[in-house]
Amino acid sequence: MKYVVVLPDGVADLPIKELGDRTPLEVARHPNMDWIAREGIAGLARTIPEGFKPGSDVGCMSVFGYDPRKHYTGRAPLEAAAQNIPLGPSDVAFRCNTVTVRDGVLADYSAGHIESQDSAELIKTANERLGKYGLRFHPGVSYRHLAVISGVEYAKTQCTPPHDISGKPVDAYLPVGAGSELLREVMRQSATLLKDHPVNKRRLQQGKTPATMFWFWGQGTAAAFPPFRAAYGLRGGCISAVDIVRGLGRLVGFDIIPVPGITGYFDTNYSGKAEHALKALAEGKDLVVVHIESTDEAGHMGDAKKKIQAIEDTDRLVVGTLLDGLKRRNEPFAIMVVPDHPTSTALKTHIDDPVPFALYATNGPKDAITAYTERAVQSSPTRFEHGFQLMSFFLKQGRP
């Protein structure tokens, strides 16, 4: 039996007035996801436990089959694992975004989805000029970077994700609590440092959005998980352009499968993800998780049209390619589509509502749900109050 989990980040949504009070999933054409729902089982799973902030760190942990209440320490440590950044017992890793602030307002949480090469230059300067504050900066992908500092008290600092405050004054959302004074000072210094940086001068000349500040959030101490193979008995692989998902995969013992041209954005190599997943299964993997970030990015941008397009691209190029390849194999298979959390396009941020899932397994059961949408699955009796239990349920489908 071969297994595939397709994880379209933040694909679930709330009804949008401009779409006739429908969600992007309800408007988009996704016949392959609908086939999975129609020929298999669909339902709802609460991937964000009560008391946790809705984010990919928590939601993906649930989707991977691990209880966040037992294993969660923070977002940044997962990303540190993806970059092979060691964390000592007193180290705290922070997510460090390159953001754009204009007139005191958070104008862009991604600095125009800054290119990795540009942001790597900014992080290099940060190490040279801001390292005196005890922070070690590590470049990541696009706007997503890390900063590590020694001192367990920083794990308790209260920080706000920048994608939650688009269009809002930043002063009201700067870090507070333990260790916040130093972090706020570094953030203020970063604004001065970046103001006349050659990278930003070049970006402005090219008509691109400048990166005007570093923003700290998502901190935590080193994370550890029981291996997936020990917990579930399967050899796993993970495909993602996003450090947080790759880091989680690495920590649970998955092989990280490289795919050329994946970006975590709308220009990503959708079909390449599916093709490499099929290849990994053919070469001995039992299960592959295929993560798609573009659906979430569109939600944070507040762009329903882009989210609809990302859903349709995911369905056609990822889910469609996977189904065609799996059906051609002379071997039973199971496939599941499930997001980590909903992302409200109207609110431009994550919400903690239960997520819709749909799964199909060769010789597996079938219910009465005929479409993969938030509204369609509401009538399903198959629900998981603890989302991490969904993985075990999925792996049991189709087994004799």
Image: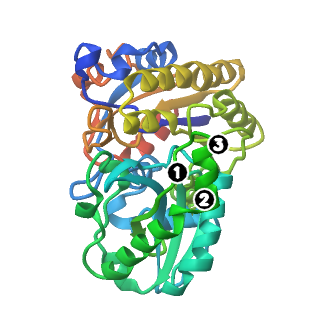
Above or below, 67 relative to 304: below
Left or right? Give the position of 118 relative to 89. right
Judging from the image, what secondary structure is the residue with disc 3 in?
Answer: loop
**Which is more toward the observer, 328 or 289?**
289
Q: Residue at x 38, y 78 (%)?
A: 185
**Which is more toward the observer, 15 or 190?**
190
Quarter holding residue 159: bottom left
Above or below, 305 relative to 213: above
**Reading the chain from its start, which is encountered first: label 3 or label 1?**
1
The CA distance from mark 3 to mark 1 is: 44 Å
Provide the residue designation for mark 3: 286
State the image coordinates of residue 346 (x, y, percent, origin top left). 27, 32
Provide the residue designation for mark 2: 140
Q: What's the residue type where badge 2 is placed?
A: Gly
**Reading the chain from its start, which is encountered first: label 2 or label 1?**
2
Provide the residue designation for mark 1: 210
State the image coordinates of residue 388 (x, y, percent, origin top left). 38, 50
| Quadrant of the image containing the N terminus | top right
Judging from the image, what secondary structure is the residue with disc 1 in?
Answer: loop
Q: What's the residue type where badge 3 is placed?
A: Asp
Can residue 206 be seen at all in this image of the molecule?
yes
Q: Residue 183 has which mark? A: none
